[in-house]
Every structure is written in C-alpha cells, then in structure tokens.
C-alpha cells in the first residue's frame, strides 16, 4: 500500500484537513519536498522531529501562500517587502523577527525570537497552504543525515511510514534547498546558499550581501546559541523529585509523587513533552517568586535526545 496521492481537488482537500487536524503531509515545492505540519499545532511540529529522527530541534521554515500575510506574521520593513515582491514565490527564505508571539510556534522556531519564512513556487504547495488556512512548517522530507528528496518516491522511501499523506507533484525543478537570508540586521547575510544566487540578490538590492561561513544549524560559536535558550531563571536538569528545592519551580516528566508546577507529559510521552517544552520554560520564567527551575530527567531516546540537547543549553550558565 502506498500513501502517495495525486494532487486532485479531493486529495488536496483531504491533505488540508490532515494539516489542520495535526497530521503530517509531505508536499512538493520548487526546491525539495517538505514534511509539513500546522505551525500552530505544537504536537504536530514535534511529530516532524520525531519522524525525521533529528537529535536537535532545528528551527523550521514556515511556508506561506500570500505576500500580504508576511507583515502579519513577521516584523517587516520595505527592504523585506521589496525582496518578497521580487523573488516570491521562489527559492528564497527570509529570517525576520517574530511578530506572532504565540507560544504555540515556539517549537517551530526552536525558541528563537526570529522565524524563517518563504513562499514556495509550486501550485500544489500553494493550494495546500491556502486550503489549510495556516502557515505550514516544513523541513526537507528526509530522515536526518540523508539527502533531500526531490520526488514523491524519495519521500516514501525515507519517511513513507511516518507521514499521513505524500502529495505527488512530480520532480522538483530546482532540486536544492532555498537560499536563506537573515534580514534582522543592517546588512543582508546569507545563512545558507541555495536555489537563488548571491549575485541575483546583489543585482536587485544594489548592496553587498554577506556570507555567513557557518551553517545556521551548526553555529561556529555555540555559546551564542546557548544563550538563546537560557530562561531568565536558572534551570537545573535531571533533578530527581526528592531533590527539588522548595524555592524551585518544578517541571516534571512522567509520574511523580511530589506536586509539580507543570508536567511535560504525565504519561511519559516524549512527543507530548517536546510540544510543551518551550512554552513551559516561558511560563516558568514568569514565576519570579521562585529562585530557579528544576526539571525531571527525560529519557535519552527518540525525541528525548532533542529535548535533552535543548534543556542542556537552557541550563547552561557562563
Ligand atoms: O528549500 C527549502 O528551504 C526546504 C523546503 C521544504 O522549503 N526546506 C528546508 O528546511 O530546507 P530545513 O528544515 O531542512 O532547513 C531549514 C534551515 C535550517 O538550517 C535552520 O537552521 C534554518 O533554516 N532556520 C530556520 N529558522 C531559522 C532562524 N530563525 N534563524 C536562523 N536559521 C533558521
Ligand atoms: Mg534539510
């Protein structure tokens, strides 16, 4: 049995319902196939990381279908809007500051204050996003450390059993990922080279575009990233419930006897825990009547790897 679907009107409608209801749909774009989920459904976003078997929560790109929606979703200026009008839809992703402060998208943004957004040039992708009525976050639809998929069959071979539907839009025309540019600073910086050339960007903007030699997912100075994830209250991790101090905000995992302020997942479900993680850290740091945050141990398997990576960073103190 195959879960590859032709993009008929009925199948697109079914795919949009699947996205709305928190499922995963792989879909074609101009660059590579994406593994899509509703950005506002943190459990679905956690499902992406689980399916990809990614040991880190890398921030994901939101896919939108309408340039006019961009200023509602992110902090824009005329430079960003001009670039969008010139190059969207197309193989160019923007990193902009978040406007939508909805904690539900924290996991998609890996806790960053910025977000990545693009408008793909593919009729199936655009129709899916429109009918879903939400931005669709999608990394490339391959397992961690395998090559990016450019046909529906590649997706099936890599992730077939992990997605609800794979929409078949033929082979991707560009075949490499988008160029990602950081628009949050004075200069435009290419974070990842991809389907749109630096020259094309320079011709249009008349500015020198800078290249970031380090990949955005493997920053050269991890200390920089470590800071991003640190809540304002000190966080202790792997704390047994008997060792939680009275002046600590207790975030539990699984069954505990001591009353917890919050529980990542009472039933010990790592996917559920991932979906709560960033929102709970945000909630905890608001409680300044506590001296710190204590968190239960989280098992080091499946999504636990990514959760532990993030909380290790969040607990890091200089
Ligand atoms: O062509 C593409 O861009 C494909 C298709 C499916 O759209 N998507 C894709 O997604 O390549 P992914 O998850 O494989 O790569 C997204 C990259 C990651 O390297 C991530 O670190 C970076 O985008 N990224 C996302 N949000 C970011 C942010 N706020 N700041 C810096 N980098 C960000
Ligand atoms: Mg990728």
Image (tube, helix red, strand yellow):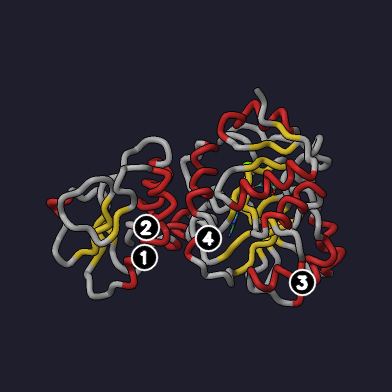
Mark whose residue sits in front, 4 or 1? 4
Mark 1 touches mark 3? (CB < 8 Å): no
**From mark 4 to mark 3, how far is it between C-alphas?**
22 Å
Q: Is mark 2 within 8 Å of ligand 1?
A: no
Which quadrant: the C terminus?
Answer: bottom left
- Measuring from the top left, give residue 242's x and y in whole percent: 12, 51
Name the residue: 73% across, 32% down: 152
Q: Name the residue tied to disc 3.
A: 81
Task: Tell me the distance, in whole angstroms, between the alpha carbons under discs 3 and 2.
Answer: 34 Å
Q: Residue at the front extreme? A: 10
Question: Crowding near pointer 3: few (<14 within 10 Å), some, many (20+)?
Answer: some
Residue 210 or residue 193, whichever sits in front:
193
Question: Alpha carbon of mark 1 to alpha carbon of mark 2: how far?
Answer: 6 Å
Quote the CA–CA distance across marks 4 and 1: 17 Å
Name the residue beneath numbered marker 1.
231
Labels 2 and 4: the sequence-earlier one: 4
Dot 3 and dot 2 residues touching (CB under 8 Å): no
In this view, the residue farthest toward the top is: 1
Dot 2 crowding, Cα within 10 Å, few <14, some 14–19, many 20+: many
Disc 3 or 2, which lies upstream in sequence?
3
Q: In this view, does 93 lie to the left or right of 18?
A: right
Q: Are marks 1 and 2 in contact (CB under 8 Å)?
A: yes
Q: In which quarter of the image is residue 86?
A: bottom right
Q: Earlier in the sequence, mark 1 or mark 2?
A: 1
Q: Which of marks 3 and 2 is in front?
A: 3
Quadrant field for ligand 2? top right
Residue designated by label 4 = 105
Mark 4 element type: helix
Q: Where is residue 90 in the image (x, y as percent from the top left)?
A: 80, 54
The N terminus lies in which quarter of the figure? top right
Residue 214 in sight here: no
């Amino acid at each position: 049995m195959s879960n590859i679907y032709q993009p008929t009107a009925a199948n697109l409608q079914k795919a949009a319902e699947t996205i709305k209801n928190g499922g995963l749909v792989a879909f074609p774009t101009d660059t590579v196939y994406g593994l899509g989920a509703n950005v506002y459904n943190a459990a679905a976003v956690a499902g992406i990381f689980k399916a990809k078997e990614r040991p880190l929560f890398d921030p994901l790109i939101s896919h939108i279908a309408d340039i006019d929606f961009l200023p509602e979703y992110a902090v824009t200026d005329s430079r960003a809007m001009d670039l969008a009008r010139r190059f969207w839809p197309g193989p160019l992703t923007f990193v902009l500051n978040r406007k939508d402060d909805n904690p539900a998208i924290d996991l998609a943004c890996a806790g960053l204050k910025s977000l990545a957004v693009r408008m793909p040039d593919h009729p199936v992708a655009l129709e899916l996003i429109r009918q879903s009525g939400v931005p669709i976050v999608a990394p490339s639809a391959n397992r961690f450390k395998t090559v990016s998929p450019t046909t529906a069959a590649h997706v099936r071979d890599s992730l077939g059993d992990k997605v609800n539907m794979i929409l078949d839009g033929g082979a991707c025309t560009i075949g490499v990922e988008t160029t990602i540019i950081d628009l949050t600073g004075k200069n435009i910086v290419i974070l990842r080279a991809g389907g749109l050339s630096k020259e094309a960007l320079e011709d249009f903007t008349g500015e020198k575009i800078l290249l970031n030699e380090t990949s955005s997912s493997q920053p050269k100075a991890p200390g920089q990233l470590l800071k991003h994830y640190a809540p304002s209250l000190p966080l202790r991790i792997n704390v047994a419930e008997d060792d939680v101090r009275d002046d600590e905000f207790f975030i539990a995992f699984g069954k505990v006897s001591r009353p917890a302020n919050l529980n990542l997942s009472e039933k010990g479900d790592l996917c559920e825990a991932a979906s709560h993680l960033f929102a709970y850290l945000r909630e905890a740091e608001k409680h300044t009547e506590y001296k710190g945050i204590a968190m239960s141990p989280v098992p080091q398997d499946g999504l636990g790897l990514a959760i532990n990576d993030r909380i290790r960073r969040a607990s890091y103190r200089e």
